[in-house]
Image (cartoon, grey):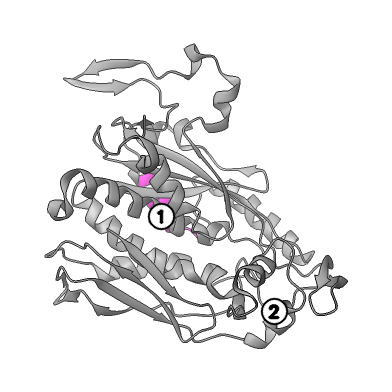
């Protein structure tokens, strides 16, 4: 299912166009609204004060609650923009942000109000698209969920360390999705909350890691090369602002292992091939193994902070200082969890449709 996101943070609206949507799929709009609410801003002190309803208006592709087979287009209006907060940043680009690279790429013509197309605001239509993809995947018994793995070094329980996850574990991630901070260990979540509050008081921000899983995938989905499962998922995840790293299964820990430790031993169980361990994160050769698909995405701290930073004056071509004004997230990790789920769900749906065809759902 191809998708394209349109709009800018402080424009009239943002949205998404989904193509190759199979006809006849019932869409649960309440579930979509729940996913949108998980990402929405302005709900607590952990997020930006910008308040947006994030209510998608479906313009085409759905009739009487069912997909029609036509391209599905949804629009989300921007209602609480304060563009004046960003007027300074065209002249004084934020370190670590796309203010400078956008100016270099688009010659100063990009609409950078509210960070324009580089804003985390654009993850709202991504989450809508992902919510549709998750409902289509569920028809094939595939579930996608995620949680905060760590924030600023404060670690949540890893999925592989949870006996409940090894015996199925969807309930763990479904429960986390209903928490203000989507974690498995609520004690770790409270420590994360305190760290975010402290960073905000100090005019600073925090980054973290999100762990995402997909269960119910049969073996054989995906392909080698540029369209491997890792490639499709990574491509979508790097469309989420702030993502700077991806690892699958043991990831970078493979570099410290021997082959005897890294390999996943196989055995027959009830007529099926199963893996005794899952160091490869459910993927081998770009193709699913039938084990749970596991990956982690690292997000950098938000670059818009209230502390003085060194930058440049683009008009005077001289060094300068900057304190970023306006409303910004001290940490985006918790709001990015549904966006990472969406990125993974869209990638998996693409791989499933490549293998079985568009009408397979």
Is residue 220 shown above or below 82?
above
- Label 1 SS: helix
- Quick one: label 1 or label 2, which is nearer the N terminus? 2
Q: In the drawing, what numbered circle is on residue 343?
A: 1
Residues in magenta? 171-179
On the image, the x and y values in percent for residue 190 come to 61, 53
Residue 18 shown in magenta = no
By secondary structure, the bulk of the magenta-drawn segment is best described as helix
For marks 1 and 2, give the CA distance: 28 Å
Q: Position of residue 111 (x, y in %)?
A: 58, 80
- Work out whether residue 258 or residue 30 is closer to the camera in this orientation and state it: 258
- Tell me where residue 23 appears, x and y as whole percent: 13, 65
Q: How many callouts does the rendering have?
A: 2
**Residue located at (48% from left, 55% from top):** 337
Which is in the foreground here, disc 1 or disc 2?
A: 1
User: Is there any visible trace of residue 340 in the rendered image?
Assistant: yes
Q: Residue furthest top?
A: 260
Dot 2 corresponds to which residue?
326
Give the camera-side residue of 45 and 335: 335
Q: Residue at x 41, y 33 (%)?
A: 281
The quadrant holding residue 342 is bottom left
Residue 5 vs residue 183, the one in the foreground? 5
Query: Within 10 Å of the Cα at label 2, are there few (<14), some (14-19), or many (20+) other Cα atoms?
Result: some
Res. 275 mark: none
* 194 relative position to 333: left or right: right
């Amino acid at each position: 299912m191809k998708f394209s996101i349109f709009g800018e943070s402080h424009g009239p609206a943002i949205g998404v166009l989904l193509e190759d949507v199979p006809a006849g799929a019932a869409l649960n709009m309440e579930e979509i609204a729940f996913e949108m609410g998980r990402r929405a801003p302005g709900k607590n002190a952990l997020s930006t004060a910008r308040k947006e309803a994030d209510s998608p208006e479906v313009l085409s592709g759905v009739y009487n609650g069912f997909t029609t087979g036509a391209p599905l287009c949804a629009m989300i209006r921007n209602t609480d923009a304060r563009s004046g907060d960003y007027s300074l940043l065209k002249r004084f680009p934020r370190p670590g942000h796309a203010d400078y690279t956008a100016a270099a790429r688009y010659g100063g013509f990009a609409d950078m109000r509210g960070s324009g197309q580089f804003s985390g605001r654009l993850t709202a239509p991504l989450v809508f698209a992902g919510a549709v993809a998750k409902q289509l995947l569920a028809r094939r018994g595939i579930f996608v969920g995620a949680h905060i793995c760590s924030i600023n070094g404060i670690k949540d329980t890893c999925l592989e360390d949870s006996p409940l996850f090894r015996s199925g574990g969807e309930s763990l991630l479904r429960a986390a999705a209903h928490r203000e901070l989507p974690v498995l260990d609520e004690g770790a979540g409270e420590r994360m909350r305190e760290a975010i509050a402290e960073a905000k008081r100090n005019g600073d921000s925090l980054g973290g890691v999100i762990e995402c899983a997909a269960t119910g995938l049969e073996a054989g989905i995906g392909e080698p090369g540029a369209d491997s499962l890792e490639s499709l998922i990574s491509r979508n995840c790097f469309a989420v602002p702030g993502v700077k790293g991806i690892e699958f299964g043991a990831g970078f820990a493979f570099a410290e292992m021997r082959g005897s430790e890294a390999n996943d031993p196989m055995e027959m169980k009830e007529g099926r091939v199963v893996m005794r361990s899952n160091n490869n994160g459910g993927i081998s050769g770009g193709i699913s193994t039938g084990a749970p698909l596991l990956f982690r995405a690292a997000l950098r701290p938000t670059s818009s902070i209230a502390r003085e930073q060194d930058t440049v004056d683009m008009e005077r071509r001289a060094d300068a200082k900057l304190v970023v004004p306006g409303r910004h997230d001290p940490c985006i990790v918790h709001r990015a969890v549904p966006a990472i789920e969406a990125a993974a769900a869209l990638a998996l749906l693409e791989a499933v449709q490549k293998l079985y065809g568009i009408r397979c759902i």
